[in-house]
Amino acid sequence: MGIREERRAQMLREIQGATLDLVEQQGLDATTIGDIAARVGISERTVFRYYASKEHALMPGQQGLIDTLVGRESAHSTASGILGDLLEVCRELFALEVEQSDFRRISRLLVREPEMMRVVARQERTLVEALSAALVQRGHLGSIQALLVAEVVTAAWRVAWQAFARQEFDGVDSDPVDLFDETVRELGELFPRT
């Protein structure tokens, strides 16, 4: 990684850290881009060079999830095969998210800040729309199957996050990736293959 990339990565971390600190202290609604910029010692304009909104700065992994899933080609052409591939990608991203970000802090905020769930819901809508459109465009699935696959993938991600957030909030030590695996197992039990 070159100096420019290192500086960019450092600035992304600083902005996200400041955003998390402020939202934990003040709440999401009370936190402004101006507050974030002041905490980092940069201009508001600079914040917007790195993140489109305070919500994006708070949970930058969501855009990465969308980009990765939408860009993912499956080796399968059936809905169940494509779903399996996408769930495996989600698992990998979930594990990476746990390693590389402030997963625990964000999880606690999801439970404590009702506005956070509205932010997540908007991001999930974006994911479902983009993923279902990409699946239809690839030609393996019709619009209803593509929408169902996109909704199930999104629901699995959300349920695993929520299960972890609840346990984290309650002080229960758990492995987020194990919770993701449990979510997918439970999903399989709800809809067994016949």
Image (cartoon, rainbow, N blue to C red):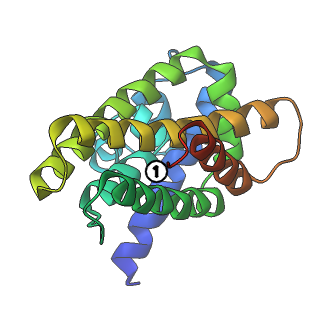
Residue in the picture at 49% in, 29% down: 35
List x then y, in percent, for residue 25: 68, 25
Residue in the picture at 19% in, 49% down: 141
- In the displayed structure, 38 sits above or below 72; it is above
* Residue sitting nearer the eye, 130 or 122: 130
Q: Quarter of the image holding residue 169?
A: top right
- In the displayed structure, 5 sits above or below 44; it is below
Question: Badge 1: few (under 14), some or many (20 or more) residues near its Cα, within 10 Å?
Answer: some
* Residue sitting nearer the eye, 176 or 98: 176
Q: Does residue 44 appear in the picture of this structure? A: no
List x then y, in percent, for residue 93: 51, 60
- What residue is disc 1 on? 61
* Residue sitting nearer the eye, 68 or 83: 83
What's the amino acid at mark 1?
Gly
Judged from this view, the residue extending furthest toward the bottom is 2
Residue in the picture at 60% in, 30% down: 22
List x then y, in percent, for residue 64: 38, 55
- In the displayed structure, 100 sits above or below 161; it is below
- In the displayed structure, 43 sits above or below 93; it is above
List x then y, in percent, for residue 154: 43, 39
* Residue sitting nearer the eye, 55 or 136: 136
